[in-house]
């Protein structure tokens, strides 16, 4: 009777489900700490190539890490002295004028200004004004939600100190950490599988971070230069914002383009057509010329899956979750691919009728 009630196979399934549920609960409870460590790992991958290049000339990995950190500090200090005051002044001006600009948009006054500059008819201006006035609460509500989402990273500003500190340990002990992960395998086959997974994730993260950094730098420079040439206000704020948004695949660049266009409309920018042409042409260049050449096949994830990953990551952990969602999905893909390939390799080969088995 007891055997009928307590089936060992059912018990193993229940225990596995319980362990899986506890693991998910732990990940959810410790998501901020785990996200901090993930950012530290990504930062370590960002500077690892330079550390490896300096390791031999400086005769030691610790010396190379110290030299790279000194170089980064010098660059940040230099950029701060060169463009820091200008960026700060533009940021303060944007923060001060944004409430009044939004008020003009909600009252319809901004539509009249834009319509007069572009020669819109009074009937067309009235239609647009009525639309903005009737949907004022909805528009302002979306604005507040977007502002709250964008302000979330400011709550973790102290991470800017912790991330480089934690990255020191990953840079110094990264190889031994990888070997310890491989040593967790009990059998030679398991260790071989773990070694392949660790190697694949290492290559994927390294190439992904470097590619994203190059794409973000290109966007930052091009946006800042072109918006300055077009005499759009707050170009020194919008350019870096567009560069940072490049780290969120697919969704980030679209949001950055919308923000640039909205700021142009709110400031009554007279050359909207040229601005829209630039935004469209640059997006085409990034997506179909620069990204395929720079990114290559480091992820092998379709754009649809990237969008779903970004949206899910943003829903779970806000902007931070959106930033790390695509590398996390790429890592899961590597795990699945490696494990399934090992199972297929171990599966017996069915011989063709009339031939001898190859095993």
Image: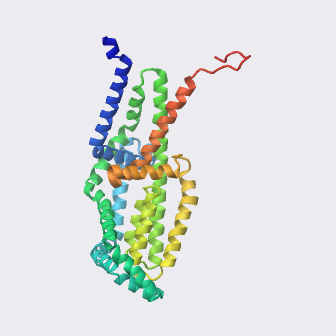
Nearer the observer, 295 or 45: 295
Nearer the observer, 285 or 136: 136
Rendering quarter of residue 182: top left
Whether residue 114 is visible, yes or no, is no
Colouring = rainbow
Rendering quarter of residue 328: top left
Instruction: Please provide percent x and percent y for residue 21.
Output: 32, 34
Residue drawn at (39%, 26%) of the image: 184
Residue drawn at (47%, 64%) of the image: 219
Height in image: 133 above or below 148? below
Whether residue 231 is visible, yes or no, is yes
Nearer the observer, 224 or 56: 224
Instruction: Please provide percent x and percent y for residue 289.
Output: 58, 60
Q: Which image quarter is the C terminus in?
A: top right
Instruction: Please provide percent x and percent y for residue 112.
Output: 39, 86
| Outermost residue to the top | 1
| Outermost residue to the right | 354
Q: Which image quarter is the N terminus in?
A: top left
**Figure label count:** 0
Nearer the observer, 14 or 99: 14
Instruction: Please provide percent x and percent y for residue 24.
Output: 32, 37
Residue drawn at (39%, 86%) of the image: 113
Residue drawn at (30%, 67%) of the image: 141
Height in image: 37 above or below 258? above
């Amino acid at each position: 009777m007891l055997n009928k009630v307590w089936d060992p196979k059912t018990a193993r399934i229940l225990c596995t489900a319980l362990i899986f549920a506890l693991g998910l609960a732990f990940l959810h409870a410790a998501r901020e700490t785990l996200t901090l460590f993930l950012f530290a790992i990504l930062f370590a991958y960002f500077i690892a190539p330079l550390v490896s290049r300096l390791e031999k000339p400086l005769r030691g990995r610790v010396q190379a890490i110290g030299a790279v950190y000194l170089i980064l500090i010098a660059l940040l200090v230099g950029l701060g002295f060169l463009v820091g005051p200008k960026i700060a002044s533009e940021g303060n001006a944007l923060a001060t004028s944004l409430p009044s600009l939004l008020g003009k948009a909600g009252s319809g006054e901004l539509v009249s200004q834009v319509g007069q500059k572009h020669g819109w008819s009074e009937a067309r201006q009235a239609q647009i004004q009525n639309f903005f006035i009737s949907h004022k609460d909805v528009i302002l509500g979306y604005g507040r939600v977007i502002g709250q989402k964008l302000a979330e990273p400011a709550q973790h500003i102290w991470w800017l100190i912790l991330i480089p500190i934690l990255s020191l340990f990953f840079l110094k002990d990264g190889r031994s950490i990888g070997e310890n992960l491989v040593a967790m395998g009990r059998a030679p086959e398991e260790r071989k599988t773990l070694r392949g997974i660790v190697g694949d994730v290492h290559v994927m993260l390294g190439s992904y971070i470097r590619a994203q950094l190059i794409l973000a730098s290109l966007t930052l420079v091009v946006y800042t230069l072109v918006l300055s040439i077009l005499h759009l206000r707050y170009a020194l704020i919008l350019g870096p914002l567009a560069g940072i948004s490049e780290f969120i695949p697919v969704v980030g660049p679209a949001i950055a383009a919308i923000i640039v266009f909205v700021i142009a409309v709110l400031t009554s920018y007279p050359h909207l057509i040229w601005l829209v042409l630039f935004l469209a042409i640059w997006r085409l260049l990034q997506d179909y010329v620069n990204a395929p050449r720079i990114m290559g096949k480091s992820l092998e994830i379709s754009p649809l899956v990237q969008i779903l990953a970004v949206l899910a990551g943003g829903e779970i952990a806000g902007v931070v979750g959106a930033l790390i969602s695509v590398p996390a999905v790429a890592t899961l893909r590597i795990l699945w691919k490696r494990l399934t390939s090992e199972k297929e390799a171990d599966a017996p080969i069915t011989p063709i009728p009339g031939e001898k088995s190859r095993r």
